[in-house]
Image (tube, rainbow, N blue to C red):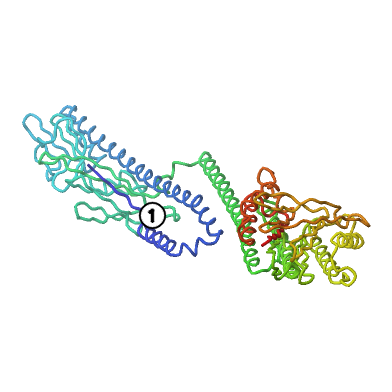
Amino acid sequence: MLEVFFRTRGNSISGLVVLAFLLAGFAFRRQLLWRVRNRLVLSYFLFGVVPVVLIGALIVVTLELSLGQLAADRVKRALDARIGEVQAAAQDINQAPPIVSSDLRKRLFARMPRLGMVLESNGAILVDPPDGPFHTSPVWVEPGFQGLIQVGDHLYIAAKRSAVLTFLPLTLEELNTLTGEAINVAGIGMGDDDVNIQPDSNGRGVTISSKGVKRVVQARLRPPRGFWDIVVVGGIPWKAPTETKRENQVFLVAFTRPSLLLQGMISGSVGYAIRTIFILIAGVLLAVELISLVWSLTLTRTITRSVNDLYLATQRISQGEFSMPVPVRGKHQLSDLAASFNGMTMQIVKLLGEAREKEKLESELEIARQVQDRLFPRTVPQLKTLELAGICIPGRYVSGDYYDFVPLDARWTAIALGDVSGKGVSAALLMASIQSALHAQLKFRGEAVNPVLSTAALMALLSQQLYESTPAEKYATFFCSVYDDETGGLTYTNAGHLKPILVHAGKASGLEGDGMVAGLLPNVKYDQQEIQLERGDLLAIFSDGVPEAENGEAKEYGEDRLAELLAENASKPLEEIIRIVTKSVDDWAADPDTRDDTTIVLARRV
């Protein structure tokens, strides 16, 4: 089977250049593809340029092959016409009477000077020219044959009709005479089917090779009219019988240029109109391509500038610089993104300012918390008949709850617990005021006149002081008591506070007595009660942060649950009981951040 390979000039150099670009791109892909602009350019190149180049290359190769095949077809048609002339000559000689055949041969020789013949008539053989390749009519050429034959190393156009064989030597001059100046023809006769035709790098010819044997054939064509006017090549395979009755492969190569091949095909007013239309179409397509290119570059610049502005802005923000906003360029999504980024930066600046203010406030609150901690008892009085323990857990930084143990003398000890309305700093300040007022009243109570402290009178004084020094909506619940370390008696006054729980003989109950909250009304009178604590009795005084803690279903912890827990653990150390109670309340509460201040004071008679 015949195989013909056409290779474009410069393929090797182009392949090396492309390979070098690919290797360089692979080696530096991180540096090249880091920028968004390079990525977009590469995307445009892959989506736009590469398909155009491939389509253009396909069109060029297709045109080159088509023009080469067109040239080969012209050569074949011219050769077929000459074979027809040789065949017609054989037919005419075969049909002409012997009398006129001599004149006929003269006319044929005048038209085809190199025409030869072999004529057998009545046992006589006429060979013309005498020194031609045949002495008799070759038997290996069948009657009725017309085409190419090979005798030795020479090709002939031959036709056989009955006893007449006409033949015409097929030389390069004869071939080129057939096609004129537009096409050059080179031929090669071979006995195999594997022929390779490769254009020379200088564009002036081809190298024909078969089984390692190469033959360089130069085309005799006029100079090109431009870079596009390259040499195109077409091949014409032909079978030629030989003296050995074997058909050899004859290969004819046609050379031409597009300008030579197409001349005369487009001419006159129609040709001018066609050329004008093609030029206009090419101009429009070129303009569209240029507009697309400019538009693509503009879009790329818009995108990459916006991305680069955002990148630089993030770099500045990471270094703590918020004073330079991102430039807002145009009106599109990226400009809206830049505006949103600027808005976000302003919010960050605002939040940073708020965070700094919060840090200051937290620092001040921490100082306030440390100061408040010093208001609570630093040490627990060591009494002979009573154990004491207490804890205050603020719901926030500072607490509005207050508890205190104040030894009055060797016998009497004051035990107090208060809960100021509200939370936070205002409640803590009011609590500090109550603490100072309580200590002032206890310190200057006039022991010579009234050696035994009246809790009712003390609460009346505290309530009046709070009423006079605080807004009307501020008040406090308070439980004030005095313990007698000799008798175990406890005198107390409850000013609107939760009833303390007394655990006696394993049963829990609330202490009797209640009164108006402190600081809400002027000149309030209070009562006082007294109970006797027996050995093993446990008294729990607490703020509302314990029973009012809510779970996920908004259900309160409750005083009953607290009473049961105290009764179950009444014999344990006071610190352990406090841990058990606070853990139980923490486990119960759904959101510890919303809990109120939690304060517990435990007293047990020993």
Q: Amino acid at mark 1?
A: Arg
Residue 301: where, in percent of width, then height? 61, 58
Q: Quadrant of the C terminus?
A: bottom right
Residue 207: where, in percent of width, then height? 27, 55
Residue 124: where, in percent of width, then height? 7, 33
Disc 1 designates what residue? 222
- In-image side of 532 versus 242 (left or right): right
Q: Nearer the viewer, residue 32 or 221?
A: 32
Q: Nearer the viewer, residue 593 or 112?
A: 593
Asked if residue 144 is positioned above or below residue 25 in the image, the reply reads above
Residue at the left extreme? 123
Q: Nearer the viewer, residue 433 or 287?
A: 433
Residue at x-position 34% and y-position 46%: 180
Q: Quadrant of the N terminus?
A: top left
Asked if residue 588 is positioned above or below residue 320 in the image, the reply reads above
Residue at the right extreme? 523
Number of numbered discs overlaid on the protein picture? 1
Tag 1, which secondary structure? loop
**Image quarter for residue 12?**
bottom left
**Taking the image as drawn, is residue 343 in sight?**
no
Crowding near the residue tagged with mark 1, few <14, some 14–19, many ≥20 C-alpha atoms within 10 Å = few
